[in-house]
Image (cartoon, rainbow, N blue to C red):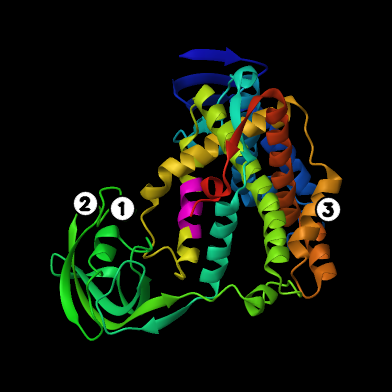
Amino acid sequence: MERVESSDVQVAVESAEGLKRRIRVSVPAQRIEREVESRLRSVGRTANIKGYRPGKVPEKVVRQRFSDQVRQEVMQDVVRSSYSEAVTREKLRPVGDAQIETTPDSGDQGSDLSFTASFEIFPDFQLQGIDVLTVARPEPQFDDADIGFVIDNLRRQRRIWNAVEREARDGDQVTLDFEGRLDGQPIENGSGDQVSVVVGGGRLVPDFERQLAGVRAGEQKTIQVEFPADYPNKTLAGRQGDFDLRISEVAEEQLPEVDEEFVRSFGVESGERAEFEQDIRKNMAQEFESRARAEVKKQLLELLLTHNPIDVPESLVAEAAASLQGDAARNLGLPDRQGAPPVETYLPAAERRVRLSLLLGAIIMEQSMVANRDRVGERIDSLVRGYDKPDEVRKIYYQNAGLLGQVEDMVLEEQVIEWLTERATVTPKPTSFQALVGS
């Protein structure tokens, strides 16, 4: 046990495991009593007690009335100040609030005040690998197949579905009701009414979707579905469930023709296909540039993580996992976290998020970066552009410290990525549009 002493506060580091710390702090009785006496004199000058004029209350009465209260207040303040003094002296950077445990009878009249503080600290590390970053930057290599790929996607945005009497095939849309059971018991959130699913579209569990091929409208059947071992809901992962299906409709896709009407619907007044394809190339170039920056960012962050396998505070990971679970619940339309995958599901992603935050924060601190005000303004302008009254929303952003801070954090992250890119070896990688954005 390491013991460090200063003026009157004694500090002993009791344990140090990973990022966890437990310290014992002792404050001599003399300091407590001096502060209690000082505060009692102050109270005596201002106390308003029936039968006595202000400032004329006898010391004995003041002590009887206020001694216990004052002592408690003094102990709370001394614990707070001595804890702060202790972590500063030990050069520790606590994460959040410490868990304080006061020794029984500690701080009673004539007794030293002793307490233990348990907490986690931020990791102390030196950034590694900044000088050996190597990334491949996608460079556009467009051809007619890419143009056709984009046009087909635009056609699918305007597709219609026509009911058919035949069996469902890959690419058809099946509308159905389903009810799921696990070991004979209903699966939570495992049922749906009039759900439309494109066979082979990847929306549902693969084994479920695969068994929709061959069904017909009006058919009822029960299927056994194998849930993947890595399924987010750990209750179902790797297990088999039974699903009762009622098929309402099987429909095939009908895509619109690329005629003048179709071309005009995308803002090309002439209706000319050549002009339409020219616009597509322009938009593809913009989309490609955005995706290429995102790909470089992804590579840089992965390399940063690889070169810096730092420990992260468990408390921060727990907070991040809870936040991710809350986001998932909102995305699923759930009023609370019930029904969302358990919080443990999000721990790996949460740990990655925390580690990246610490690494990026270290770069920001070492390079004394601040968010560029012009870029913050531009980002806010882009965020409010879609509102009916953008000027009012913009004012809210600038008046709300939390919202403004979020935008500043986004801009700072962009600046860090640019800083890393400038120091990285960037190799161009010819890439088709389809390969970059996926199908």
Question: What residue is pinned by disc 2?
Answer: 238
Q: Give the vertical position of 237 relative to 254 (above or below).
A: above
Mark 2 to mark 3: distance in Å? 49 Å
Mark 1 to mark 3: distance in Å? 42 Å
**Location of residue 181 (image quadrant):** bottom left
Determine contact: label 2, label 1, CB under 8 Å. yes
Instruction: Confirm whether residue 292 shows in the render.
Output: yes
Sequence-wise first label, 2 or 1: 1
- Three-letter amino acid code at the position of disc 1: Tyr
Instruction: Confirm whether residue 52 shows in the render.
Output: no
Q: Give the vertical position of 118 relative to 438 (above or below).
A: above
Sequence-wise first label, 1 or 3: 1
- Three-letter amino acid code at the position of disc 2: Gly
Question: What residue is pinned by disc 1?
Answer: 231
Query: Helix or strand or loop: what does disc 3 sit on?
Result: helix
Residue lying at 55% horizontally and 24% vertically, measured from the top left:
26
Along the viewing direction, whichever of 61 and 254 lies nearer the viewer = 254
Question: What residue is pinned by disc 3?
Answer: 377
Residue 8 at x, y = what percent? 64, 20
Residue lying at 64% horizontally and 52% vertically, measured from the top left:
65
Residue 401 at x, y = what percent? 76, 54
- Magenta region: 320-327
